[in-house]
């Protein structure tokens, strides 16, 4: 997408139209000029007549360095000055009005190769900023925009000025975590080379920096294939100089300004999948299309797994060993690898770095080729060979939705039995998602759907209690009681959660109601005893607290009374 500057946009808006704009009204930009057509393009009366069309749609912006031919025409129609007579175009920075006041506002509307005739208002035309007296009465300029170089003040303080010599692809810019391949030559302003990469370039991670601090700052503004020239002030280069000479390259004197020709050859995106740098994915090869494996997808991968020191401890899909097939989001592989695979496209190859919290944790694990020590960071090189996405509930009919919900509930039950409570909760949630009533079920199916929902909510509450997620357990049980107000299991589990959150009065109410429904329920009676013990302990704590408070108040009142007591004769002594 081509971006136009605000100055360019304003040049096509008529002042009267701007004043008549109603709140919320959208004003379309003026259509492009036809050859031979003239139009006023700014509120100060600047007019533009198109003589020859340019190429593309991009236009320069204020601050860019433009190269133009121009011919100045006086009020009587005679030619005053011409760069064509000199044989060479002129180059200057837009915004400094080097040729004539107001002309730059016309040049920012031009495309590369375009020729246009600009008519300046008399008061503007006579206000040339050049010292050449031949321009003083010029009212028209025929301008050809030969080319321009985009100028960027990278740090907005003049410390790094970037000239874009060759635009890159629409890929980028890289981020802090990405690995970049660059080529550069760094010179002093007298042309002496002080640093140069090999022909094949040099690779590094942006966050790690390289050569001088200007380099990563500039790279984070570049696209793949972009070539630039950087003018780097000492504060972003080497204030104290670089005293080390290596490979015959001269040292850099203190406070030197550097000119760096820089090319971003390519970069490998590194994605922080977990937000805490726990799982990083560096893409080595882009996959096919736009679809990625999702949670619950059946995937086939091949990979190697190494420790940080390079020790290979596992390999699948190579040297006659079968590739690994698994279902994502079911804890069939370490969490870090699982999270990486669900972001991958078919055919994608990536390096996945997994910190211990998303790997094997602080336990020692025996794998096929080596032991994995406790607290190890794991490095996978993985390729996604195939995947089949889990079918979306919206793509199923009612019968299929019920079948999938039943299957997921059973899968959740198996995970619960294995102690994988978080994964079990996810399965129950997915089961319920399958039977959300976006489309009505028939009467017979409604009974099954209700039964499934109740079972998933109850089992989810049990899993939440195991994980100490008491508020979530309360929510799950409350959903059950909304459709089945006399469900003893829901009352029992919600009472358990209330007891853990010290809401003893609410727990007592749930237990009382559960025993009214099922007076002989052994489990409810057991937690009733526990509740009574908790209430007794709470009462004792309250009694001690109040006793302490009353004692403190009594002491304060006694001290105040003594301070206000009237002295006796004995206290004053005899006359």
Image (spheres, grey):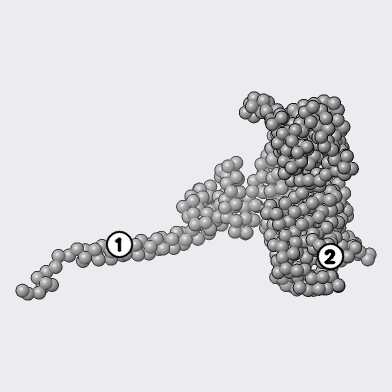
In this orientation, does residue 199 appear?
A: yes
Please indicate whether residue 46 sits to the left or right of residue 468 in the image: right
- Residue picked out by circle 2: 193
Please indicate whether residue 91 sits to the left or right of residue 553 in the image: right
Q: Earlier in the sequence, mark 2 or mark 1?
A: 2
The quarter of the picture where the N terminus appears is top right
Checking the image for residue 553, the label placed there is 1
Mark 1: secondary structure? helix
x and y percentages locating residue 218 in the rendered image: 76, 56
Q: Residue at x 94, y 64 (%)?
A: 320
x and y percentages locating residue 283 in the rendered image: 82, 57
Q: Residue at x 57, y 46 (%)?
A: 478
Between 181 and 460, the one nearer to me in the picture = 181
Q: How far is mark 2 from mark 1, CA to CA?
A: 83 Å
Q: Residue at x 84, y 65 (%)?
A: 193
Please indicate whether residue 15 sits to the left or right of residue 292 in the image: left
Mark 2: secondary structure? strand
Characterize the local packing of mark 1: few (<14), some (14-19) or many (20 or more) Cα atoms within 10 angstroms. Answer: few
Please indicate whether residue 499 sits to the left or right of residue 279 in the image: left
């Amino acid at each position: 997408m081509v971006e136009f500057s605000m100055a360019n946009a304003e040049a096509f808006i008529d002042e009267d139209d701007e004043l008549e704009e109603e709140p919320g009204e959208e004003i379309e930009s003026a259509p492009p000029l036809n050859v031979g057509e003239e139009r006023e393009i700014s509120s100060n009366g600047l007019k533009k007549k198109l003589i020859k069309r340019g190429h593309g749609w991009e236009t320069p912006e204020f601050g860019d360095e433009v190269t133009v031919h121009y011919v100045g025409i006086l009020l009587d129609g005679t030619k005053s000055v011409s760069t064509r007579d000199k044989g060479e175009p002129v180059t200057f920075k837009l915004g400094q009005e080097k040729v004539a006041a107001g002309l730059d506002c016309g040049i920012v509307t031009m495309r590369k190769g375009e020729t246009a005739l600009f008519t300046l208002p008399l008061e503007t035309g006579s206000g040339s900023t050049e010292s050449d007296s031949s321009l003083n009465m010029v009212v028209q300029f025929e301008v050809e925009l030969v080319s321009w170089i985009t100028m960027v003040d990278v740090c907005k303080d003049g410390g790094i000025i970037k000239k874009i010599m060759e635009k890159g692809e629409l890929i980028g810019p890289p981020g802090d975590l990405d690995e970049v391949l660059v080529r550069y030559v760094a010179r002093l302003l007298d042309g002496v080379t002080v640093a140069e990469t090999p022909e094949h370039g040099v690779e590094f991670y942006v966050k790690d920096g390289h050569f001088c601090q200007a380099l990563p700052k500039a790279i984070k503004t570049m696209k793949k294939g972009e070539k630039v020239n950087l003018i780097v002030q000492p504060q972003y280069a080497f204030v104290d100089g670089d005293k080390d000479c290596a490979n015959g390259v001269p040292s850099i004197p203190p406070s030197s300004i550097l000119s760096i020709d820089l090319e971003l050859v390519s970069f490998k995106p590194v994605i922080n999948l977990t937000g805490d740098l726990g799982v990083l994915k560096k893409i080595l090869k882009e996959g096919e299309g736009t679809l990625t494996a999702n949670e619950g997808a059946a995937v086939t991968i091949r990979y190697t797994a190494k420790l940080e020191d390079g020790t290979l401890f596992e390999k699948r899909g190579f040297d006659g060993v079968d590739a690994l097939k698994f279902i994502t989001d079911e804890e069939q592989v370490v969490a870090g690898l699982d999270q990486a695979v669900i972001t991958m496209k078919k055919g994608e190859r990536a390096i996945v770095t997994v910190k211990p919290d998303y790997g094997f944790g602080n336990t020692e694990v025996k794998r096929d080729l080596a032991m994995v020590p406790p607290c190890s960071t794991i490095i996978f090189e993985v390729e996604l060979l195939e995947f089949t996405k889990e079918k979306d509930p919206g793509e199923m009919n009612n019968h299929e939705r019920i079948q999938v919900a039943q299957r997921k509930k059973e899968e959740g039950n198996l995970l619960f039995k294995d102690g994988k409570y978080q994964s079990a909760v996810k399965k129950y949630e997915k089961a319920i998602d399958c039977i959300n009533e976006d489309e009505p079920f028939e009467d017979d199916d409604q009974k099954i759907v209700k039964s499934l929902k109740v079972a998933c909510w109850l089992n989810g509450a049990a899993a939440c209690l195991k994980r100490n997620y008491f508020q979530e357990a309360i929510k799950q049980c409350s959903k059950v009681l909304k459709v089945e107000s006399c469900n003893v299991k829901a009352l029992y589990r919600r009472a358990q959660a209330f007891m853990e959150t010290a809401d003893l009065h609410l727990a007592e109410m749930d237990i009382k109601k559960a025993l009214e429904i099922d007076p002989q329920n052994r489990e409810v009676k057991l937690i009733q005893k526990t509740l009574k013990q908790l209430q007794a302990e709470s009462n004792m704590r309250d009694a001690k607290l109040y006793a302490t408070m009353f004692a403190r108040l009594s002491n304060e009142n006694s001290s105040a009374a003594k301070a206000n007591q009237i002295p006796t004769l004995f206290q004053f002594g005899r006359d």
